[in-house]
Image (cartoon, rainbow, N blue to C red):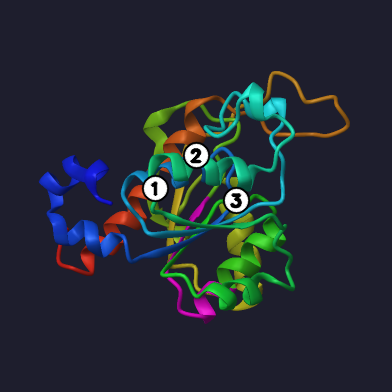
Amino acid sequence: MFDFLARQEILLGKEANQFLSQKTVFLAGVGGVGGYVLEVLARAGIGKIIICDADTVDISNLNRQIISLHSNIGQEKVSVAARRAREINPEIEIIEEAVFIEKTTAKTILEKYRPDFLADCIDTIAVKVELIAAAQKLEIPLISSMGAGNCIDVRGAKITKLNRTENCPLAREVRRHLRKLGANLDYAVVYTDEIRRKPAKRETAGKTANGTISYMPAIFGIMLGGHIVQEFLKEIGIE
């Protein structure tokens, strides 16, 4: 099982690989950020990942989402992501939840799986805050992705606590909503303090969207996945 982790074993030891193989992560959203989180976790040998996303691959995803290709446009993202993860590690247990998490179902779906960690990579604020609050009530460790849109400077990306973020409109809104729920703002997030750029244009296909470049969601996702692995390793004294 661990042959593909030979280089990681050199770094961390066999016991660490075995420990990570027993861990479960709930991945909410497998798009620009979430796809890279899955990549990190699968290649680090995490044993079980629940992928939750009801979206399908769209041509507009190709500039930033690692799971997206011309050959899988129109397919469910969870199915595409699961196939990729199994190609990396055939022993991994992937559970596909092709559903949108709703405000009323956030706590229920976390209770169903009781993961060791939650990776929050969703954009809808109302659902995002309910998921965060539910994880805190259930004492599930978590890390959230804040906004990478309208940014291009890699130097601004960092991991901090939500209550220490600056210049991030999404973080500001998440804080405001979490306060209303009485939730804790002192938890880990990936964000950038870059001042948001004015978009050169807005999408005209019936919707408005933030502009994104190939590497910013990737940086967020890799940092988020790395944080989760590091938090697991701390449990066995590796820091």
Visible residue check, residue 126? yes
Most foreground residue, 135 or 67: 67
Residue appearing at x 72%, y 40% in the figure: 56
Most foreground residue, 220 or 184: 220
Residue 84 disc label: 2
Task: State yes or no: residue 136 in magenta.
Answer: yes
Q: Quadrant of residue 57?
A: top right
Task: State yes or no: residue 81 in magenta.
Answer: no
Q: Is residue 8 left or right of residue 64?
A: left
Answer yes or no: do the residues labelled 2 and 1 have beta carbons within 8 Å? yes
Give the secondary structure at mark 1: helix
- The residue carrying mark 1 is 42
Give the secondary structure at mark 3: loop
- The residue carrying mark 3 is 29
- Upstream in sequence: badge 2 or badge 3: 3
Residue appearing at x 56%, y 53% in the figure: 171
